[in-house]
Amino acid sequence: MTTLIDLVYASPLFFLILFIGLQRFEKRQLINGIVFNFFLFSALMDAALIVIRLNNETLNNIAIAAAIVVVLIVMFFYLFGIVLLLWNAYIVWKKKVTRYPTC
């Protein structure tokens, strides 16, 4: 079990080094964003494991409250992005209908 936890602690460093290497090679690739998201996720997981292993109830409650707030904010932005994409699709659809009338 400790080997798995040590591996989880080392994964943010691995993804950060991989991201920096890929970023220096080519800045405009999709894989850079994916690797950076893996880095962020593994760093948050690492921070969560550190908080859990401290066994401080006050700190755990604060971390849970902060995690709930962050999840709600992320969900809001995803929903906002979906609404904007649908709005854009509606505008493009309306412009296409008026531009190319059917015979």
Image: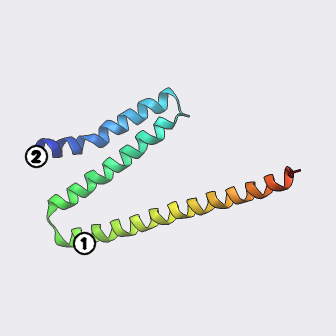
Q: CA distance from mark 2 to mark 1?
A: 25 Å
Q: Residues within 10 Å of mark 2 (few under 14, many from 20)?
A: few
Residue positioned 41% across, 46% down in the render: 37
Q: Amino acid at mark 1?
A: Asn
Q: Examine the rendered structure and indicate whether residue 35 appears above or below residue 57.
A: above
How far across and how far down the image is residue 95, in percent? 80, 55
Depth check, mark 2 against mark 1: the one in front is 2
How far across and how far down the image is residue 87, in percent? 67, 61
How far across and how far down the image is residue 101, in percent? 87, 52
Q: Residues within 10 Å of mark 1 (few under 14, many from 20)?
A: few
Instruction: Please indicate whether residue 91 sits to the left or right of residue 19 in the image.
Output: right
**Quadrant position of residue 49:** bottom left
Secondary structure category for the residue under label 2: loop
How far across and how far down the image is residue 51, in percent? 21, 60
Residue positioned 36% across, 44% down in the render: 39
Instruction: Please indicate whether residue 90 sits to the left or right of residue 54 in the image.
Output: right
Secondary structure category for the residue under label 1: helix
Marks 2 and 1 close (CB-CB < 8 Å): no
Residue denoted by label 2? 1
How many numbered circles does the render carry? 2
Residue positioned 52% across, 29% down in the render: 26
Residue denoted by label 1? 61
Closer to the camera in the image, 99 or 27: 99
Residue positioned 85% across, 51% down in the render: 102
